[in-house]
Image (cartoon, rainbow, N blue to C red):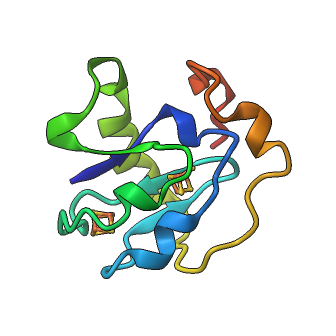
C-alpha cells in the first residue's frame, strides 16, 4: 500500500484524493490516512502531493515506519474524502517542518 507520512500533518493539501481510483483516503482534522486494504498501489497519488508526504510502503523512509500502522488505524475511524478542499490555513508554514507527529489530531 501507499502510506501518508509526517509531512502531511498540519498541511493537508488534499490534492491526493482527487486522483485515487478507489477513493481510499480518509480525513482527520489535520492529516489524511490511506486504507491499506483498499489501496491498489496505482501510485497516482504520490506525485500529486505538494508536500511529498506519500510513499510506497516499499520505499518508506526508515523514520516513517510508525505511519504504516497509523494509516491503517486512522483510516478505519475517519470519514472518507474524495474531493479536494482548501489546504489548512498555515500549510505553507508547516510544510517541511520535521517530526510533526506530536501535532497529529485524532
Ligand atoms: Fe489511491 Fe493509488 Fe494512492 Fe493507493 S496508490 S492511495 S490506490 S491513488
Ligand atoms: Fe496530505 Fe499531501 Fe494529500 S499533504 S492531504 S498527502 S496531498
Residue 9 higher or lower than 35, as above or below: above
Q: In this figure, what is the number of numbered marks?
A: 0
Residues 22 and 56: in front is 56
For this view, does 28 lie left or right of residue 67?
right
Q: Residue at x 36, y 55 (%)?
A: 46
Residue 32 in percent (x, y) is at 53, 54
For this view, does 94 lie left or right of residue 54?
right
Q: Residue at x 41, y 76 (%)?
A: 19
For this view, does 68 lie left or right of residue 12?
left
Q: Residue at x 68, y 28 (%)?
A: 103
For this view, does 9 lie left or right of residue 75?
right
Image quadrant containing the C terminus: top right
Residues 76 and 45: in front is 45
Residues 56 and 30: in front is 56
Residue 45 in percent (x, y) is at 37, 63
Q: Ligand 2 appears in which quadrant?
A: bottom right
Residue 80 higher or lower than 106, as above or below: below
Residue 84 higher or lower than 46, as above or below: below
Quarter of image, res 28: bottom right
Image quadrant containing the N terminus: bottom left
Quarter of image, res 86: bottom right
Residue 97 in percent (x, y) is at 64, 23
Residue farthest to the right, as pictured:
89
Residue 88 in percent (x, y) is at 78, 52
Amino acid at each position: 500500500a501507499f502510506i501518508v507520512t509526517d509531512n502531511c500533518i498540519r498541511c493537508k493539501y488534499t490534492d491526493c484524493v482527487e486522483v485515487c481510483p478507489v477513493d481510499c483516503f480518509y480525513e482527520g482534522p489535520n492529516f489524511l490516512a490511506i486504507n491499506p486494504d483498499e489501496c491498489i498501489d496505482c501510485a497516482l497519488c504520490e506525485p500529486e502531493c505538494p508536500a511529498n508526504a506519500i510513499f510506497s510502503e516499499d520505499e518508506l523512509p526508515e523514520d516513517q515506519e510508525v505511519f504504516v500502522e497509523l494509516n491503517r488505524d486512522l483510516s478505519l475511524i475517519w470519514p472518507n474524502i474524495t474531493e479536494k478542499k482548501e489546504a489548512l490555513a498555515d500549510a505553507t508554514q508547516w510544510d517541511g517542518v520535521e517530526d510533526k507527529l506530536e501535532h497529529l489530531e485524532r
